[in-house]
Amino acid sequence: MRILLDVYLAENFGDDLLVALLCHKFSHHDFFLLADESYSSRFESLENLHFVGALSRDRGFGTRLVDKVRLLLGLPRMTFMKALAIGNFDAYILLGGSLFME
């Protein structure tokens, strides 16, 4: 199974640990991390983890225009590029230790 990981990586131990645990627990699946190669040294021991370039977090004119169109069409709150990337995978996982605090 091909699984896309969208992880909040801010050079902290907890989020790195979440990725490592997930990859070890489900070692028979291939995980694709939305991050640039600068994170590869942290996860070099994980043979089932691959990197796909981080999607642009740039808020340039093009991104703002796509977001406005997306809102007008009532599409979910994710970037157009991420939606395209998700279509190439069997599953999508959003990981972050404090992303969903109440």
Image (cartoon, rainbow, N blue to C red):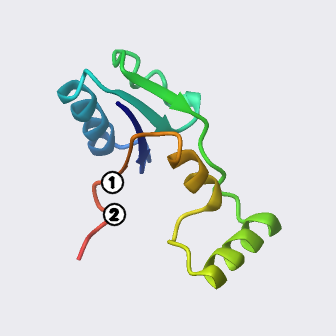
Quadrant that contains the C terminus: bottom left
Residue kind at label 2, given as amino acid type: Leu
Q: Which mark is residue 41?
A: none
Q: Say whether residue 26 is left or right of residue 67.
A: left
Per the image, label 2 sits on a secondary structure element best described as loop
Q: CA distance from mark 1 to mark 2?
A: 5 Å
Q: Residue at x 28, y 28 (%)?
A: 23
Q: Residue at x 63, y 60 (%)?
A: 80
Q: Which residue is mark 1?
A: 96
How many residues crowd around disc 1 within 10 Å: few (fewer than 14), some, or many (20 or more)?
A: some
Q: Residue furthest left?
A: 25
The residue nearer to you, when weighing 70 against 43, is: 70
Determine which quarter of the picture holds residue 72.
bottom right
Q: Say whether residue 77 is left or right of residue 73.
A: left
The residue nearer to you, when weighing 94 against 2, is: 2
**Contact between labelled residues 2 and 1, with CB atoms less than 8 Å apart:** yes
Per the image, label 1 sits on a secondary structure element best described as loop
Q: Residue at x 57, y 46 (%)?
A: 85
Residue 35 location (% of width, % of height): 53, 38
Q: Is residue 12 above or below residue 99?
A: above
Q: Residue furthest bottom?
A: 72
Q: Is residue 82 above or below residue 78?
A: above
Q: Which mark is residue 99?
A: 2
Residue 97 location (% of width, % of height): 28, 55
Q: Is residue 89 above or below residue 101?
A: above
Determine which quarter of the picture holds residue 90.
top left
Q: Is residue 94 above or below residue 54?
A: below
Q: Say whether residue 70 is left or right of residue 5.
A: right
Residue 99 location (% of width, % of height): 33, 63
Residue kind at label 1, given as amino acid type: Gly
The residue nearer to you, when weighing 89 against 45, is: 89
